[in-house]
Amino acid sequence: MTPRRHLLTVVLEDYYQLSPFKGLISRDHWRRFERRVEIGTRRALELLDEYELRATFFVLGWVAEVAPELVREVAERGHEIASKGYYHRGIREMSPDVFREDLTRAREALERATGRAVRGYRVAENWFGPDDLWALDVLAEMGYAYDSSLKPVLRTWAREPWRRWAHRHTGPSGSLWEIPVSSASVLGLHLPIGGGNYFRQLPRGLVKQAVARWDRRAPAPYVMYFHTWELDPEQPRIDAASALARLRQYRNLAHMEDIIRYYLDRYQFESIEKHLGLATMAAEVPANTRAAAFAAQTGDTDAAQPVSIVVPCYNEEHTLPYLSGTLETLGATLAPQYSARFVFVDDGSEDGTWHVLQRLFGSRPDCALVRHDGNRGLAAAIGTGIATAGTEIVCSIDSDCTYDPQQLRHMLPLMSDGVDLVTASPYHPKGAVRNVPRWRLVVSRGASVLYGLVLHRKLATYTSCFRVYRRSAVLDLDLREPGYLGIPELVGELDIRGRVIVEHPAILEVRLLGRSKMKILKTVLGHLRLMTRLAGRRLLGGRRPAAARLPQSVEPSQERAGA
């Protein structure tokens, strides 16, 4: 007897685009992350070639725009390309009009990459429920041949049990096939067994038994899926995510290939396109009229003011690819008013930071790399960068990008004549904080309040490393604190000398990759020691800045981080 043929689908997306990280990672920041979509996709292709299988790949339109050659390769190797929408959004985030726009944009990107018509769709997030069937009517209206966005869970479809199987959906605009992801029935409840996270989280023996029962008894093909990123267990960890999100994302990643092989060894699979008898069709590809999102800005470079941007790094091997993506467009953002040069200071890292710096930035003419023999501390690293910089205006940014460097476009103009320091302030009434751990806020806010009692200039934030310096004003400062405490110490010394400090409201976000190196108790005691010393300096010889030199109030930027 000929074995039954089931349906194999693959979701082509990258590790940072997923539901567990929603609220942490804005899609405006996707381009900043290390792109690894090729790694998991090529492993999936090799696996399918080994078993001589062809599958349906559900692909984000965004991926097709940034990696068209990869999507084209998948199609050329005989696999069907279907849509997963343009961005990673659920249907409840979109009105019918927004849904149509998303479908159109994704289809154009996919067809432009492959030259083939796209006839299938799967929603990127949360699947369709009974209140979402209007989306099937929109898909039929737009000429899609099938959808695979239903996943029976618990009693979601208890009133329409036939929707658990492949069926024809008919609406006012026509009809299309619905191909639900497979589920097992347990005590009247439906439990997904189609793959992905369920393969990695549920007891393997129970899932194997459920799939075998489906193969023997179910009236429709078994619909299995996995994600390309699930074949990349070495992917960077998003440490800022919740424990539940990390469990969902990373548990059993190392075993996923073996799990998939188990099912490929035992069952026969084909693509949805082949199962439905859909002939491969060429697409009518429209011209790409969208401007390149990251096109270089032109301007009179001779008239641009040169600025240096110092980036201190200590054990940031895994953060640097994200930093590289973040800085990719900063020069264009600051042009034509400013011409940016970067100074990276490796503060005696013990991991592969120096080698990654050389790989990412070593050959760039606008970058200089400096290395400390040992770990001297954050303030010392920034000081080395300022001394290395050949410009009067020098910025410092965090290597973990907790402040969006794009905010420099609003801070740099504040460095006018007579101003010596512009410092970012998330605790300013018009600043903002996003997802930052409470302990960090307590330490930083508390320190800023106390520094305000000790110093002349009353700032909302004294501890931010995100700053613009007048080089001549800070080069001769004799800081006693080479580490993190040197950051507020520098403000204190400028304050005592009567220098002008401007505060700009900014947005502080949680560190996404890696963990903070701050030791809480040591930092708190250090702040108290520094405050005592600064208070003594002020009493013995400090003077208050002239009122005429204080800056005017600063209006916040209208553009939020990542916009």
Image (cartoon, rainbow, N blue to C red):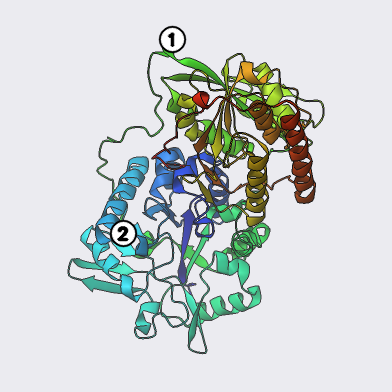
Residue nearest the viewer, comparing 422 with 299: 422
- Contact (CB < 8 A) between labels 1 and 2? no
The circle drawn on residue 302 is 1
Looking at the picture, which amino acid does disc 1 mark? Answer: Asp
All told, the count of numbered labels is 2
Mark 1 against mark 2, which lies toward the viewer? 1
Q: Residue 386: x percent and y percent?
A: 65, 21
**For the residue labelled by badge 1, is the local secondary structure a helix, a strand or a loop?**
helix
**For the residue labelled by badge 2, is the local secondary structure a helix, a strand or a loop?**
loop
- Splitting the image into 4 quarters, where does residue 359 fall? top right
Evaluate whether residue 475 shows in this view.
Answer: yes
- Residue furthest toward the right? 374
Evaluate whether residue 329 shows in this view.
Answer: no
Looking at the picture, which amino acid does disc 2 mark? Answer: Leu
Identify whether 394 is placed above or below 509.
Answer: above
Identify whether 526 is placed above or below 276.
Answer: above
- Splitting the image into 4 quarters, where does residue 151 fall? bottom left
Residue nearest the viewer, comparing 259 with 191: 191
Badge 1: how crowded within 10 Å, few (<14), some, or many (20+)? few
Residue at coordinates 79% horizontally, 36% vertically from top-left?
Answer: 350
Identify whether 561 is placed above or below 228.
Answer: above
Relative side of 433 to 520, left or right: left
Relative side of 22 to 439, left or right: left
Q: Residue 315: x percent and y percent?
A: 73, 38
Residue nearest the viewer, comparing 555 with 407: 555
Q: Earlier in the sequence, mark 1 or mark 2?
A: 2
Circle 2 is placed at which residue position? Answer: 278
